[in-house]
Image (spheres, rainbow, N blue to C red):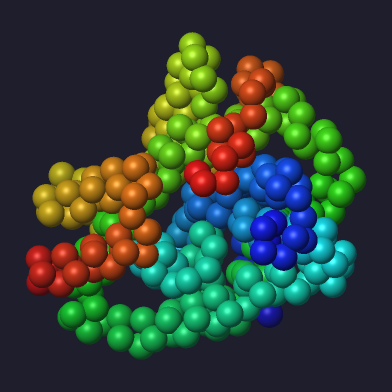
Amino acid sequence: MNDLFDLFVVFLRAGAFSVGGMAALPQLRQDLVAPGILSEHQVLEALAIGRITPGPTGFYVMVLGYFAAGPLGAVIAIVAAAVPPLSVIAIAGLVRRQILSAWAAGVVRGVVLATAGLLVYTGLTLIAPDRQLLEVPAWQLAITALGAALTIRGSIHPGLLVAAGALAGIALGR
Amino acid sequence: MVERYGWLTHRQFLEDYAISKMSLGINLIAFAGLIGWRVARYRGVVLSVLGLIVPAGIITLLMTAAYVSVQNEPLVRAAISGAGPAAAGLTIGTGITFARQSARRGWRSAIDYGYAVAALLAAFALGARPIAILGAGVIVGAILLRGEPSRASADPSL
């Protein structure tokens, strides 16, 4: 039971210190992989599955929770992840004008830009969870580069991109 | 919601969208809740957030369970060997998109991109302590990065 509470705290904290669904990823990775609850490879699997399933960006937290503690873990993850955005609704009711001020915009910009750097770091270090970057097959690096480029252009649905990657894996990865 | 049901004005929609873009955690939950609040107060928040989370959550749960039961099949492992790098690429692309949407225009964009790159280098150098790097982001942002709202918050199509 204690473990499940710890898991709740991990997901709550990651959500509370991030702006946006993907932004919780660097913190979650640190909290779940470093103590040995999940492997790097499972984080990557969770990202892939979370992109194929419907729902808002950020539902990969359910997959991480499932990997950590089964179906109950998935429920705990999404409940914990829902608390910070719900608290924003209450905060917005109280200080709506201040949230839309230049000062708040600066704080959010600082956090989002820092998150941008952290996400690029996380992606780069997740490509090859089990080995050195130089040992990664060229086709996998090509998929990563293509995935990044298409995401920046915004011209493809993330789920399709992951599905295309899966097909390429079936063709090339055996 | 604006055009079909007339629940809120276009301006209210954009304002809620801007706030949700700045929301902690999963933005869409905040967005759904803010709209729900306008339409039917507490009841609206509960219904809109549950409507967003429950169906997609059940599907995610079932798909994850299905994945776990077949994850050691060679075919599935091969698929993940391609889907994983695609997801890593998505993560990198999302990071770069965050920077592009958040950076200010003109000469100040150089400061903003430089700051994002500094966070990236700090992650490599310090072994990524996300909370420390984000905490620095709050302080630096409040002092140095004020001014125009992010482009993303002004345009829901982004």
Q: Would you place residue B110 above or below residue A128 in this image?
A: above
Q: Where is residue B90 in the image (x, y as percent from the top left)?
A: 36, 51
Q: Would you place residue A42 above or below residue B85 in this image?
A: below
Q: Would you place residue B107 above or below residue A38 in this image?
A: above
Foreground residue among A107 and B131 = A107
On-image quarter of the C terminus of chain A: bottom left
| Picture residue at 59% right of the left edge, 32% below the top | B150
- The reply to whether residue A24 is in sight is no
Q: Where is residue B96 in the image (x, y as percent from the top left)?
A: 41, 37
| Picture residue at 78% right of the left edge, 71% below the top | B46
| Picture residue at 15% right of the left edge, 72% below the top | A170
Locate residue A127 relative to residue A141 in the image: left or right.
right
- The reply to whether residue A90 is in sight is yes
Foreground residue among B131 and B60 = B60
For the view shown, which residue lies furthest in the right direction? A94
- Quarter of the image where one finds residue A112: top right
Q: Where is residue B95 in the image (x, y as percent from the top left)?
A: 43, 41
Q: Would you place residue A30 above or below residue A165 in this image?
A: above
- Quarter of the image where one finds residue A84: bottom right
| Picture residue at 75% right of the left edge, 74% below the top | B47
Locate residue B96 relative to residue B102 in the image: left or right.
left
Locate residue A9 relative to residue A74 in the image: left or right.
right
Q: Where is residue B62 in the image (x, y as percent from the top left)?
A: 47, 85
- Quarter of the image where one finds residue A3: bottom right
